């Protein structure tokens, strides 16, 4: 559903213009509500509600008696906010989430199939530089034959 890599900036009020291709995919799938939360690797995850609800149900199954499960759920859900895109195609990113992802102004928006990731530009560049040279090796380890 979401594909591509887009460079954008956040305005003074913390709003981010969502790329037209992503807005088009949201419209095509009749997505009204999105959930924005702390992601992994210092980025933010943005999920359509239809993708969020199964994750939420799955994470509810994590035992509260296990410290790692409690820690993960606290971080993931305490940072979650439901968001909508305004009529100008903008999304408000709360300060706590910008701080978590080290976002100041320049961002890279990455479509990752069922979710969108929002990265501080310098964090994305560092990730990309470290991962692109081993892309084929990673594919051999993680993809089924």
Image (cartoon, helix red, strand yellow):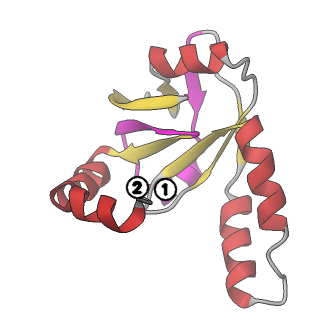
Q: Residue at x 35, y 68 (%)?
A: 141
Point out the stretch of residues depicted in magenta: 88-114
| Residue 115, x across and y down, in percent | 56, 41
Vertical arrangement, residue 5 with respect to residue 32, above or below: below
Q: Tag 1's secondary structure?
A: helix
Does residue 116 appear left or right of residue 94 in this picture?
left
Q: Residue at x 56, y 48 (%)?
A: 45
| Residue 136, x across and y down, in percent | 22, 57
Which residue, as the protein is rendered here, is positioned at the far front? Answer: 145
Q: Is residue 108 magenta?
A: yes
Vertical arrangement, residue 71 with respect to residue 55, above or below: below
Quadrant of the image containing the C terminus: bottom left
CB within 8 Å, label 2 to label 1: yes
Residue 99, numbered circle: 1
Vertical arrangement, residue 65 with respect to residue 47, above or below: below
| Residue 2, x across and y down, in percent | 51, 30
Q: Is residue 83 magenta?
A: no
The 10 Å Cα crowd at callout 1, few under 14, some 14 to 19, many 20 or more, is few
Q: Toward the viewer: 127 or 136?
A: 136
Q: Which residue is mark 2?
A: 102
| Residue 97, x across and y down, in percent | 56, 52
Vertical arrangement, residue 129 with respect to residue 35, above or below: below
Q: Tag 2's secondary structure?
A: loop
Which residue, as the protein is rendered here, is positioned at the far top? Answer: 87
Q: Residue at x 67, y 85 (%)?
A: 68
């Amino acid at each position: 559903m979401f594909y591509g890599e887009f460079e954008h900036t956040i305005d003074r009020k913390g709003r981010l213009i969502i790329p037209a291709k992503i807005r088009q995919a949201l419209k095509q799938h009749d997505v009204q509500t999105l959930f924005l939360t702390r992601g992994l690797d210092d980025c933010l995850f943005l999920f359509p509600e239809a993708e969020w609800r199964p994750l939420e149900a799955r994470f509810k199954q994590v035992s509260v008696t296990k410290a790692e499960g409690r820690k993960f759920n606290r971080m993931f859900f305490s940072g979650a906010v439901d968001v909508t895109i305004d009529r100008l195609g903008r999304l408000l990113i709360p300060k706590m989430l910008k701080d978590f992802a080290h976002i100041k102004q320049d961002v890279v928006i990455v479509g990752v199939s069922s979710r969108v990731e929002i990265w501080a530009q310098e964090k994305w560049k560092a990730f990309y530089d470290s991962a692109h040279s081993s892309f084929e090796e990673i594919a051999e380890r993680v993809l089924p034959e």
